Amino acid sequence: MSRSHRRRSALSLSMIAFAAALAGAVATAPSATADKVALVARAQPKMVRAPAPPGPAELRAVRLGLGDLKAAGKLLAGRPEPHWVRATGAGESLPGTLRFPVGKGYVTRGFGSGKGGYHQAVDIGGEQGSKVRAAAEGLVGYASGGVSGYGNLVILVHAGGAITTYAHNQKNLAVAGQKVSKGAVIALLGSTGRSKGPHVHFELLFQGKNCDPMPLFRPAAKRKDGAPAAPGLSNWKQANKRPKSIRCAPRKHHPDYVKRPGVPGTVLDTPAEVFEDEDEGGSDS
Ligand SMILES: [Zn+2]
């Protein structure tokens, strides 16, 4: 819908609201017809809703250049623009620890699993439609479904330039440009994209590398049987003091990776073409 059309719609809708209000005022006479009018008038305002003008998040996304596939490519490469990091307003230090993003979720697959260790992410299984929460305070850099393989995907930029991703969502609830607090609900868990069952494909990226988030999760990540998924817990606040338990490596490609320039979502020579969650039977624990 064009902006002018939207404005016209908003105008005509507000006229309807005005008319409904008038009808309400008229409908004070004690007759059956008047009662009917009053009922209609009372019902009207609920139905009348002008399209929302662009909110602060939408405006921020436009201003910062967030939300499109180009931005997604940079984020998935672990290379956020410095002005995106500044816009988080969250400071220089890394988040330290990460909130485990799914309340009753459990780890089904770890970092470095799959053929050649291509799966540089943690898969978190859970109930379809359950809440997916931000692992740390941040800024939504991308929230759409255009990246091949990832399904509905939300990507957050955090303090210090750390990036987290939440893929395969049933529905994204956050929008690009939005600032979110730690624990904010950003999506509903699902199985969109290349996925064999409801789960969140969670990645942590920093300075061009994929890192293993497992030791950073609080509460500590668990397997479905309740056993701890992480051998130990760590805290990573200073960029140059990475705990040894957190492995980081340049992104690897899925064995079936095929470069397909010109295909939407795969136009960038970036991880946009990484396929995950196939051929591995879901769990490698
Ligand atoms: Zn995965």
Image: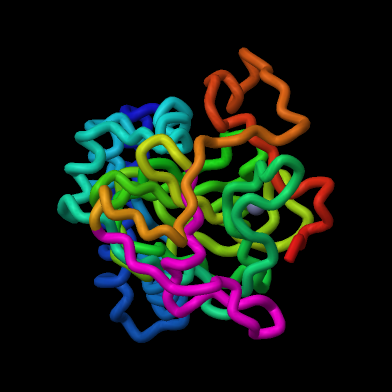
- 228 or 276, which lies in front? 228
Indicate the position of residue 4 as horizontal and vertical percent values.
32, 28
Give me the residue at 30% from left, 41% from top. Answer: 58
Give me the residue at 53% from left, 21% from top. Answer: 268
Give me the residue at 64% from left, 35% from top. Answer: 274
Residue 51 shows in the view: no
- 34 or 8, which lies in front? 8
On screen, residue 103 versus residue 12, left or right, reads: right
Residue 193 shows in the view: yes
Toward the front, the furthest residue is 244
- 175 or 113, which lies in front? 113
Q: From the image, which quarter does the C terminus lie in?
A: bottom right
On screen, residue 93 versus residue 157, left or right, reads: left
Q: Quadrant of residue 48?
A: bottom left
Q: Which residues are magenta?
A: 210-237
In reply to whether residue 211 is colored magenta, the answer given is yes
Magenta residues, dominant SS class: loop
Relative height, residue 12 to residue 273 (above, below): below
How many marks the image carries: the answer is 0
In reply to whether residue 183 is colored magenta, the answer given is no
Indicate the position of residue 107 as horizontal and vertical percent values.
63, 69
Relative height, residue 150 to residue 63 (above, below): below
Indicate the position of residue 63 as horizontal and vertical percent values.
22, 32
Give me the residue at 63% from left, 50% from top. Answer: 112
Indicate the position of residue 28 as horizontal and vertical percent values.
29, 80
- 93 or 23, which lies in front? 93
